[in-house]
Amino acid sequence: VATRASDSDFVSNTSNEPTSPQWDVSSQLRAVVVTSSVVVSYNAPLTLSPVSFTGGYWPDMNAMPPPTRPSDCSSSPSYSAVGLPSGLSMAPATGVITGNVSNVQGATDAIVTVTDYNCAAATGVVSFTVNQAGQEMAWTSHQTATITFGDPVTALAATVVDGAPTYAVSTPDVCSVSSSTGILTVLTAGTCEYSASIPAGVNYSAARVSGS
């Protein structure tokens, strides 16, 4: 749903509004929120154009004398945003939001503003939900391996994006493993079933891989 600044804001912002033929005054500036709700994962790249506009005060460049504007106004639409998730920014000239979210922070609202040639401003709200990223976990050794009973102990190894894995076995009569180092000891002949896991953290979800 599009929102805009109050009527009083428009009056104060456009008190020095020039008149035709210097200006094409189509209507009061309105922000049009194209994307009102965004769901993004931690550290995932984002490119988004969430807001457009209608109306506004724009110069007729063919008019004589040439149009003037307040010194702090832009000659083309300008955009800004307050309250974006950490790691994101908005390009003032295009309104495009880019970046990688650097913190998981649940739901948050950002106020986006578009400003016209005569410093009239209109705002809209874009809601962001930042979720945990999926933890990528994989074996780097002994996902499936044949070990002869009596051979020296061997080490399991699993890689994760964030944190350290914990190792375990589900066949304790056949084998044992160090939960922190992954050192595997074969106790008797049979199938040794083992796993590596990591709990959910601040930015990543839980993950588990298994092997035998």
Image (spheres, grey):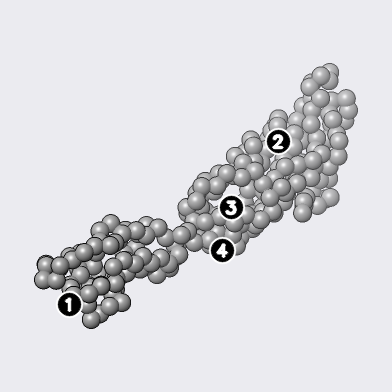
Pick the residue in front: 156 or 95.
Answer: 156
SS label for mark 3: loop
Pick the residue in front: 128 or 12.
Answer: 128
SS label for mark 1: loop
Q: Which mark is residue 84?
A: 3
- Where in the figure is residue 67, as x and y percent of width and height? 79, 25
Image marks 4 and 2: residues in contact by CB distance under 8 Å: no
The amino acid type of the residue labelled 4 equals Gly
- Where in the figure is residue 131, as x and y percent of width and height? 53, 61
Discs 2/1, front: 1
Distance from Cα at disc 4 to Cα at disc 1: 49 Å
Q: Is residue 72 left or right of residue 107?
A: right
The amino acid type of the residue labelled 1 equals Thr
Q: Earlier in the sequence, mark 4 or mark 2?
A: 2
Distance from Cα at disc 2 to Cα at disc 1: 74 Å
Discs 4/1, front: 1
Which residue, given by chain and number where applicable, does mark 1 sit on?
Answer: 188
- Where in the figure is residue 34, as x and y percent of width and height? 71, 47
Where 184 sits versus 141, above or below? below
SS label for mark 4: strand
